Image (tube, grey):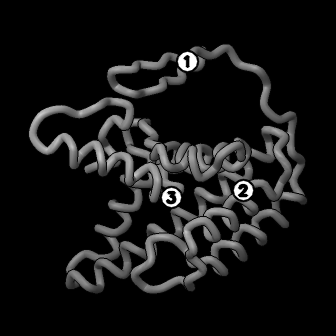
Amino acid sequence: FYGNLNPFQKFKGNHSSEINDALRQAYLFGGIQAAARPNGTIRIYRSTFRAYENKNDFLACTIAHEISHFLNNDQFNDSLEESKKAKGLDEKEREIISKRIRRQSEIKANNEATRMLYKAKYPIETCLNDLKFIARVEGDGEETKGDSTHPGYEEGIASMEDFIEQLKKESPGEGVTRIDRKWKYNRDLNALTFTPS
């Protein structure tokens, strides 16, 4: 609920002091979080900017990761795959399959973010270093469990290192060429819109 509220708006009325305090606390104690929606919207929690400080290359990895989820239509495709593989299973078995599918989507999004940044001329290990940074900031070095939606620390690092070794064998290509684009910020919605021409 609080992740969807505009942190730059001062709330008034019933429970406003609690809402405003929750927004302040979410900024101070929140970590690095972002999410992609099927409609092309990417939400980046305000605490992410505080946690990254001036690490714009790591922020670029997080954004590329979420763009990958959108471009691959992961939310829909994961749901569809779950419905096919878990049809007729009980809720517990279905949840295990669902989490396994989501972990694979997270690994693919990490790999695609690595490819995007490599093509944009960032050092090839930028997203790997970001993944390590996030784990340390969040204090999360756990292994992959059956109910994990993301790969555990060692599995996530190992799969990205394997991908980087494969990527090194490919040509980085020409990288990103300049495209005409337009940015528009809507203060009322607290939304920044990017439109390529």
- Tally the numbered discs: 3
Q: Which mark is residue 158?
A: none
Q: Is residue 186 above or below residue 147?
A: above
SS under mark 1: strand
Which residue is drawn at the image coordinates 80% and 42% (left, top)?
119
Disc 3 designates what residue?
A: 31
Image spot of residue 193 (x, y percent) = 48, 24
Which residue position holds label 1? 183
The one of 25 and 36 positioned closer to us in this rendering: 25
Q: Quadrant of the rendered structure where residue 143 is?
A: bottom right
Q: Is residue 57 above or below residue 153?
A: above
Q: Few, some or many C-alpha atoms within 10 Å of disc 1 (few <14, some 14-19, many ≥20)?
A: few
Q: Decide which of tag 3 and tag 1 comes sooner along the chain.
A: 3
Q: Position of residue 177 (x, y in %)?
A: 79, 25
Q: Nearer the viewer, mark 3 or mark 1?
A: 3
Report crowding for label 3: few under 14, some 14 to 19, many 20 or more residues within 10 A (C-alpha).
some
- Viewer-nearest of discs 2 and 3: 3
Which residue in the structure is indicated by mark 2?
127
Quadrant in which the C terminus appears: top right
Check disc 1 and give the amino acid type: Trp
Identify the residue at image location x=75%, y=65%.
163
What's the residue type where badge 2 is placed? Cys
**Label located before the other in sequence (2 or 3):** 3
Asked if the residues shown at circle 3 and circle 1 are in contact, with their CB atoms under 8 angstroms apart, the answer is no
Q: CA distance from mark 2 to mark 3?
A: 17 Å
